[in-house]
Each structure stands twice: as C-alpha cells, then as structure tokens.
Image (cartoon, rainbow, N blue to C red):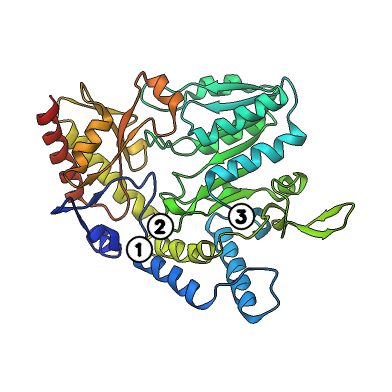
Amino acid sequence: MFDAQQFKSDFPVLQQVVHGDKPLVYLDTAASSQKPQVVIDALSRIDSTVYANVHRGAHWLSDQSTTLYEEARDCVTTFIGAESSKEIVFTQGTTAGINLVARCWSENNISAGDEIVLTQLEHHSNIVPWQQVAQRWGAVIRWANVTDDGQIDMEHYTSLLNEKTKIVAFTMCSNVLGSITPAAEIITAAHDADAIVMVDAAQAAPHQSIDVQQLDADFLAFSAHKMLGPSGIGILYGKQHLLASMPPFLGGGSMIDVVTQDDFKLADLPAKFEAGTPPISPVLAFPTAIDYLQNIGLESIGQHIESLVKLTHQQFSEIPQVQIHGPSPDQKSGIVNFTIAGVHPHDLTHALDNQGVAIRAGHHCAMPLHQRLGMPASARASFYLYNTAEDVQALTTAVNKAISLFC
C-alpha cells in the first residue's frame, strides 16, 4: 500500500509550520521537489568524506570522487535505458541541456530556410534557444497547435512535417497543464520525415519510467531537482553518433585532450561537453534520489499522484468559481491548473500562502501557451509522492476561504 504520510516524514522541510501555526502544505513540486533526509545526508557525507575535484587529481581523494562521479553516470545510464554512459552528459539543468543541443547541433545542421517544429505546450527553455537558432541561421519555426483541453493537435503536428523539417522539440509533459504528450508517436512521425527530436523530460522523468532506446529519442533532457535530487545538475542524453558529430558548447579544462599554442584536440565523449569543474556533490548525491524513487516505484508514484489529481478535480468541481484548465486527470501528470473569475492568480497564491498552502502563479515560463488559452496567468498546484489527501483538502479549504475574501 502506498503510504504518502510515511514518505512525507522522510522530508524535513515538510515538517515545518509557517506563518506561526500553519502546517506547510507544499504543492509546488513542478517547480522544484523537496529532498528526503537520505539525499540531504548523502550531500553532507560526500562533502565530509569524499569531496575533491574529479578526473584530474592524482591523489586518493580525487580517485574516490572520480569513481563515484562515473558511477553516478552509470546509474543515470541504467535509469533511462541508454546504450552507453558516453551518451550521458551532466549539465546545469534541463535548460542547459536544451541550449547545448540548440547551439552545438544546429551549427552543422541548420541553414537558411530550414524548419524547426515546436508545440504550443513548450516551456520557454524549449522555445527561446530555438528562436535564437532561427535568428542566427535564418531558419523558420513552425508551431504545432494545442487543443482547447491542452493536448497537442496531432493532425496539425504531422501536417507541419516536410523535407525542410530538421528538428522537432517537444515536452513529454506540460509544466503548465500537466498534459502527457504521445511521445512515441511524435518521435516516429518526426523520424519518418528524416528530422531528429529534442525531448524535454523535465516534468516526465519524476513521474514515469523513460527508456530512451524504446522511445528512439535523439536527445532528451531532465533535471535532478524536480525528482528529489540536488539543484544545479541536469542530464542530457544524446545518441552517441549525434554527440560525436557536434562541436563542444564550452571551451576550457576537462573538455580537451591536448592543448598547444596553435590548436587543441577534443576529449572523447562525454567529457568534451563537460568543460570546467562540474557540480561534484550534486552529481554524486543524485543516485541516492534515484534509488529512493526506484525503491518506491515510479509506477506506484504515478498512480498515487493521479489519485490526488482526481480528488482535486472532484473537490474543485463543487466550487462554481473555479475553472480547471487542461485535460482530464487520466491524461496528465500531477498538475492541476486553475483560475478563479475576478481573482488574479498572484492574489490567490498570497491568500493560500497565508493558510500555509504553497502553490505557484503566473505564466509558468510558458507565455505562448497562456496566449493560446486566452489568459495572462494561472494558478498551479502540483503534487508528488509526499502529498496526501489531507493536502488536497487543505488546498480546497484555502481556495474557498480566498473566494470568500475576494468574491
């Protein structure tokens, strides 16, 4: 049996009270998850016992740190079903991974008149880098429409694909609406058009199993901080032949084999994309977060989250002033996006915070999607394994109280 209350006890920050006497109800995991005590302990243990710069040291401590660093890479390789650890690049986060692909892959593969396909669901981190590519090389961006209930219009998407399409960039799961996209279908259609695919898995990796070989993803990026891990570390997966064909993003230490006054020779994969000192402690601690999730089971976590989303939909349906945006609970992840007529989402968020309920408001770094839906901003409650039915009730109670204040 899934015991969310027991899991919640593993997270020290969730034991707090705020504003004097309000138990903290954290419903902002889509922005950043909290860390369980085992991950906090791992960070402390790493810094206390094995921290040293990796790869370049000739002493015992550096050897220990380097071994754990590469074991972390092996852990991620297994976690997403990659063929080789050479296909795993540690970055600063999902945004950094997408920017790396946009800058480095496009350099030899995009020219004037080529087309880039995006969807209206995308986070700015999967929009702006491609707009920069289009501006730099004279490419054209095509937008796949989103339906009124927040799903990709697949008929429209496939109609955009043609001989000019070079890359399709899409999210597996919307950070605004929680919409789960048909990733395999999107990828297959892109490959049929001889295009490659960049997958934003930042919201998907915490909730569902990902097998990059089964998906046939060309590139895929996600972040540790959304799945119980430390901040400052992301994962970029890329097919080995694609990464090998790309120039490096940053120049400096670690990404080279030889440097002379006249030239340099690049290091092998994946080192050529990891210039400088990496986020050592976060990388070393990330496997602890992965182990925690896998011990519970991503499928079980997903089922629990869906039950909370269904309960929230049910309770919100009894509040006439609340409008829920996006698909039904069985077609999305742990996000409930909503608005209240006559109440700005920012005001609503402050009112809920006064009751100890932490949600997020704004455009959620997805302005094009909000423009498509005809709203300047929205409120977002996002759930994870440590949330409970009592948290849903606290949210509903706080929303009702906010309505009584504003409406």
Q: Residue at x 26, y 60 (%)?
A: 8
Structural crowding at the residue carrying mark 3, measured as other residues with C-alpha within 10 Å and reported as few (<14), some (14–19) or many (≥20): many
Q: Amino acid at mark 1?
A: Pro
Identified by mark 3, the residue type is Ala
Mark carried by residue 36 = 1
Q: Nearer the viewer, mark 2 or mark 3?
A: 2
Give the secondary structure at mark 1: loop
Quarter containing the N terminus: bottom left
Residue 394 found in image quarter: top left
| Dot 2 amino acid type | Leu
Query: In the image, residue 68 lies at what x, y percent?
Result: 58, 71
Front: mark 3 or 1? 1
Tag shown at residue 314? none
Residue that label 3 marks: 82
- Disc on the earlier residue, 3 or 1: 1
Q: Could you tell me residue 95's position as x and y percent?
A: 54, 42
Residue density around tag 1, few if under 14, some if 14–19, many if 20 or more, within 10 Å: many
Contact, mark 1 vs mark 2 (Cβ under 8 Å): yes
Numbered mark located on residue 228 in the image: 2
Q: Give the spatial CA distance, label 3 vs label 1.
A: 27 Å
* Separation (CA) of disc 2 from disc 3: 21 Å
